Image (cartoon, grey):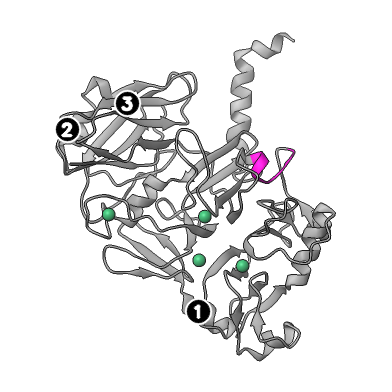
Amino acid sequence: MAFVNSPWLCWIALAWILAAPAGAQALVFSTTTDQPGVPVPVYDEELYVLDSSGIWPVLTREALGLMVGDANGNGIFDDQPLDVDAAHASGNPQPGAWLLSMTADFTMPDGTVIKDGDIFHFTDTGAVVDLPEGFFEGITGTTGIDVDGFAMAQNGDFYFSFADDEPTTNAGLIAQNGGVATLDEQCVFKFVPGAGSATIHLTPAAVVLAFNHAFAATATTVVDVCDLEIDPASPGDLLLTTLSTSAAFRGKVITTAGGGTPFMIGGQQVGPMAMGLPATTSLDALALAAGPRMPVLRTIPEIVSAATPIIARAEAWGFAAGTPVQFVVTDAVFPRSTFMAYPGHPGFASSPLDTSNPLFLACFTISTLLVTADAAGVATFSYLTAGLPAGVNALVQTVDMSGGALSTPASVAFTP
Ligand SMILES: [Ca+2]
Ligand SMILES: [Ca+2]
Ligand SMILES: [Ca+2]
Ligand SMILES: [Ca+2]
């Protein structure tokens, strides 16, 4: 067919891709443990999106380190929370695009403590708790909980799950729980704003039944529901994933639609195989994509030691082949660089780089910092670390000089 090589077809396809509604065929996830990846692992504190062309980072370890800041004061942005265990698109611009919950408490440089039961988002200058742990305790009659699943419907109703079995004093929940005062970690709760307490939306038995129905299995437990999301194709239903280690369920995602059905992306069942991850991978965060794929910057490695000189590199992915990509570097500002919004730019429309630093503008005059993206859409800046001064921490971000898209930011620290 002659049409195949027509340049017009490329433009038609591109227009179709750009017009596709965000998240229509994409699902954001996090893994429960680090998994192998190239050129860097898939870290459990990161968010990735799965779409019909594979997986892609949407919250990188490097950017997360900058969003938290240097909490322990060692001059390195290495204070990422241990593990993201719940996520939901916030509708806010970066760096606050995700409502998050973590598996462990952590402290921001300004002293703000984010608890494992909090739902929070990052801001230009720090982090804000949207729904505190105490709120979830109040609506469920519990204490010391860890939220491991969270989703919000269009009408503001929200759904959540706990990371552990939790004793409750709430008479309504005990009644819904068959008279049992311990709420199982497999429970999915629902809260309607304005109500006095949450209700059990899915009992453990209902969750197990849905997974058994989806995979023609006869399990008696799925261990723990570890995140949930509104089914984009059936908004009255939920997507669910569990900590089950059974081969039938591990790392899989179902929708409760139809009594329990495998959730599909690009004609494939969502799970470790579709993600190109080991079959032993479990997922602990599900969210709908907040926008199209954005360019991603990785510093490899993030920490460079002067004692062992290497050829280090910064790699920016996700550009069209042949795109001129400008690397921009400024000194880090401690303990946390303030993010500045660049709403006119596609991609990660925010930057922690210090525009008052003379390096910012100087970068645009250094020819080696302007790199053409290769056939795979990757722009790489490599450098020999021998002789570089220790104690310096550089923030790096790239910009597509033809389309203006900004990549995610990253840092690289030079230690003795
Ligand atoms: Ca995780
Ligand atoms: Ca640090
Ligand atoms: Ca949590
Ligand atoms: Ca749970």
Can I make out residue 406 in this image? no
Relative to the observer, which residue lies in front, 33 or 176? 33
Label 3's element? strand
Residue 363, position as x, y percentages in the image: 22, 29
Looking at the rendered structure, the kind of residue marked 3 is: Phe
| Residue behind label 3 places its C-beta within 8 angstroms of ligand 2 | no
Q: Is residue 219 above or below residue 344?
A: below
Residues packed near mark 2 inside 10 Å, few (<14), some (14 to 19) or many (20 plus): some
First in residue order: circle 1 vs circle 2: 1
Asked whether the residues under the numbered discs 3 and 1 touch, taking CB atoms below 8 Å apart as contact, a structural biologist would say no
Assign a secondary structure to mark 1.
helix
Q: Indicate which label's residue lies in the foreground, 1 or 2.
A: 2
Q: Nearer the viewer, residue 63 or 402?
A: 63
Camera-side mark, 3 or 1: 3
Mark 1 → mark 2, Cα distance in angstroms:
49 Å
The structure residue drawn at horizontal position 49% and vertical position 33%, both measured from the top left corner, is 38
Judging by the rendered image, the residue that carries numbered circle 2 is 388
Residue 269: say if magenta. Answer: yes
- Considering the image in quadrants, where does the C terminus appear? top left
Q: Which residue is mark 3?
A: 381
